[in-house]
Amino acid sequence: PDLRGQGKSELGVGDGSLEQQADDMAAVLDCMRVEKAVLAGHSMGGYLALAFAERHPERLAALILVTSHTGADDEDKKQGRIRDAERIPYCGTREFAAGLAPRLSNDADLVNRMQKIIAATSPDGLANVLRAIAARPDRTELFKQLDKPVMFIAGAQDQIVKVTTAKELHWAKPSLRMAILP
């Protein structure tokens, strides 16, 4: 589903937290009459999936993290996200998209497509997401103690979440299933 303020979904009263987004996900499952779900989250979606696991563990059948991780941002990264979130409502999303998209892939066509998608995102929605990512806590202990099947999918050429992250998570949780895509 579209997240709050993303895609075709309106922001509503966004509180800048992944916890709100996790509660939204539970409400979507309620509407669909789904008791339990296998939740897969890519990148920021992995942070959301971990927040969901923490807030709604009874609704989680299994967890898949795709090029994501369990830790919080360090202080510099957090402040950078907050600065971006403060600028976007005034400067729009194009500048942010131009800076982010090239860091996501080496494929020029893919970078161009991602840049268009990011630039088309609601400025308030994108700022809300950046605040939520910056505010997220370290959920490594939750991840290690999760009593559900867990899988991690990494990209061998991922420029942001390196394959070493998958290996670190596997050391933290030996039952973790891993797949590294070329």
Image: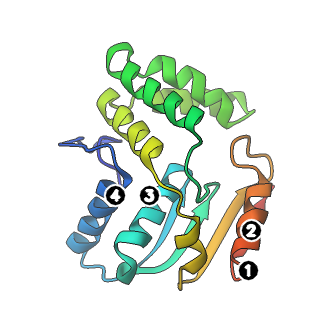
Spatial distance from mark 4 to mark 3, Cα to Cα? 7 Å
Question: x, y percentage for residue 137?
Answer: 48, 55
Question: x, y percentage for residue 5?
Answer: 30, 41
Lower sequence index among marks 1 and 3: 3
Dot 2 and dot 4 residues touching (CB under 8 Å):
no
* Mark 2, secondary structure of its residue: strand
10 Å crowding of disc 2: few (<14), some (14-19), many (20+): some
Q: Along the horizontal axis of the image, is 151 left or right of 15?
A: right
Q: Which residue is mark 3?
A: 48
Dot 1 and dot 2 residues touching (CB under 8 Å):
no
Q: Which residue is mark 1?
A: 174
Spatial distance from mark 2 to mark 4, Cα to Cα? 28 Å
* Mark 1, secondary structure of its residue: loop
The label shown at residue 179 is 2
Lower sequence index among marks 1 and 2: 1
Q: Amino acid type of disc 4?
A: Glu
Lower sequence index among marks 2 and 4: 4
Q: Quadrant of the C terminus?
A: bottom right
10 Å crowding of disc 3: few (<14), some (14-19), many (20+): many
Spatial distance from mark 4 to mark 1, Cα to Cα? 27 Å
Q: Which label sits in the foreground, 2 or 3?
A: 3
Spatial distance from mark 1 to mark 2, Cα to Cα? 14 Å
- Report the number of numbered marks: 4
* Mark 3, secondary structure of its residue: helix
